[in-house]
């Protein structure tokens, strides 16, 4: 990637006013709902959001009308169409088109209505498939993307560029953050649309309940992945808004990783599954390793607090408590 141009934004981060209106786009999703919980716990008194049935973020006129009516001072753009390897591989047009429209509409409306502080949330899949590990922010656009989710990644890269362009052209102190693999309450546990960790939780839970002798997972189990609890991400979002400014995206993660086989074994233990685990090596592994360099986040004064085992246990408890309303 070419050297990041100086954008000339003159802004010193500080505490956000707790009484000002804060719009969380995607407030009912896993990420958005965690941000809402964090904001309310930190004393924000005017947090707003609309469900997809109330406001279709792909509808440009509706988004602009919503901003004109609500006039938020702060925005967290957490709305996105997301999914695992199967969904991304099967529906690349949907992942590219829907995410581009959501981002462009929200960012353009936020600019039109003079939003002061905005954070755009992307994904670590923006980085090249074979980026040096751990992945630094400078790795962006230095190599080919992972083919199984390149359409989604391109949309998120466009969002980063959109935020940087707003900074350069209009001097807005907007920022971007790129979380690693997330999990936690309100995740998507559906067999067709989930990411690896919630998919494994559901698979092992159902196998344990059925008394199955074995579970078969995709791939070889050797890829290494980093996982961050969504409540940690929400804490990082608020911290970055109050303590960081700059044009470059900031990696958000733990800085450590585990193999898929290791995470599967941990989930098997958490769910009480006592059978064997097999691996279908005809299915794709995806990126061989993906762990983020979180040095810039640490420099900004934040590190993850929730351990993987604690996070998995609390997520599994949430899964059991909400089994009757999970997405299919």
Image (tube, helix red, strand yellow):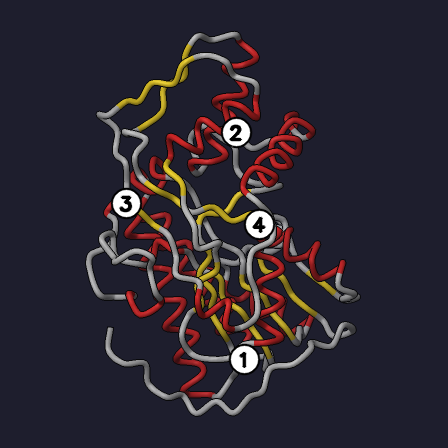
**What is the CA distance from the residue labelled 1 to the residue labelled 3?**
38 Å
Give the residue number, with chain letter if any, for mark 3: 287
Q: Nearer the viewer, residue 165 or 320?
A: 320
Q: Nearer the viewer, residue 170 or 219?
A: 219
Ranked by sequence position, the earlier of labels 1 and 4 is: 1
Q: Nearer the viewer, residue 180 or 20?
A: 180
Left or right of 210 in this view: 261: left
Per the rendering, the mark at residue 230 is: 4
**What is the CA distance from the residue labelled 2 to the residue labelled 3?**
26 Å
Give the residue number, with chain letter if any, for mark 2: 328
Residue 264, how many percent across, how many down? 44, 28
Judge whether residue 245 can be spotted in this image. yes
Q: Nearer the viewer, mark 1 or mark 4?
A: 4
**Image quadrant where one finds the N terminus:** bottom left
Residue at 47% over, 65% down? 177
**What is the CA distance from the residue labelled 4 to the residue labelled 2?**
21 Å
User: What is the secondary structure assignment of the residue under circle 1?
Assistant: helix
Mark 4 packing: few (<14 Cα in 10 Å), some, or many (20+)?
Answer: many
User: What is the secondary structure assignment of the residue under circle 3?
Assistant: loop
Give the residue number, with chain letter if any, for mark 1: 112
Residue at 51% over, 67% down? 298
**What is the CA distance from the residue labelled 3 to the residue labelled 4?**
22 Å
User: What is the secondary structure assignment of the residue under circle 2?
Assistant: loop
């Amino acid at each position: 990637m070419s050297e990041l141009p100086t954008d000339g934004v003159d802004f010193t981060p500080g505490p956000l006013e707790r009484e000002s209106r804060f719009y969380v786009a995607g407030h009912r999703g896993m990420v958005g709902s965690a941000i809402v919980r964090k904001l309310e716990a930190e004393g924000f008194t005017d947090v707003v959001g609309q469900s997809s049935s109330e406001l279709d973020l792909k509808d440009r006129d509706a988004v602009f009308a919503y901003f004109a009516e609500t006039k938020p001072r702060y925005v967290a753009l957490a709305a996105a169409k997301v999914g695992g390897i199967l969904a991304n591989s099967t529906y690349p047009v949907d992942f590219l088109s829907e995410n581009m429209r959501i981002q462009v509409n929200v960012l353009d409306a936020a600019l039109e209505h003079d939003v002061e502080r905005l954070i755009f949330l992307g994904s670590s899949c923006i980085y090249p498939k074979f980026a040096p590990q751990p992945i630094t922010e400078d790795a962006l656009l230095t190599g080919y993307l992972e083919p199984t989710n390149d359409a989604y990644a391109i949309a998120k890269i466009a969002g980063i560029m959109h935020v940087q362009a707003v900074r350069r052209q209009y001097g807005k102190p907007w920022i971007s953050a790129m979380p690693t693999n997330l999990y936690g309450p309100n995740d998507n546990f559906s067999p067709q649309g989930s990411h690896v960790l919630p998919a494994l939780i559901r698979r092992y839970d159902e196998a344990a309940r059925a008394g199955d002798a074995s579970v078969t997972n995709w791939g070889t189990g050797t890829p290494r992945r980093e996982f961050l609890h969504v409540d940690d991400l929400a804490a990082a979002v608020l911290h970055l808004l109050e303590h960081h400014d700059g044009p470059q995206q900031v990696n958000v993660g733990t800085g450590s990783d585990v193999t898929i086989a290791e995470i599967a074994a941990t989930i098997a233990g958490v769910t009480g599954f006592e059978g064997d685990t097999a691996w279908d090596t005809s299915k794709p592994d995806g990126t061989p390793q993906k762990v983020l360099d979180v040095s810039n986040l640490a420099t900004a004064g934040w590190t993850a607090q929730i351990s993987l085992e604690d996070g998995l246990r609390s997520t599994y408890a949430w899964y059991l408590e909400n089994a009757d309303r999970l997405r299919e």
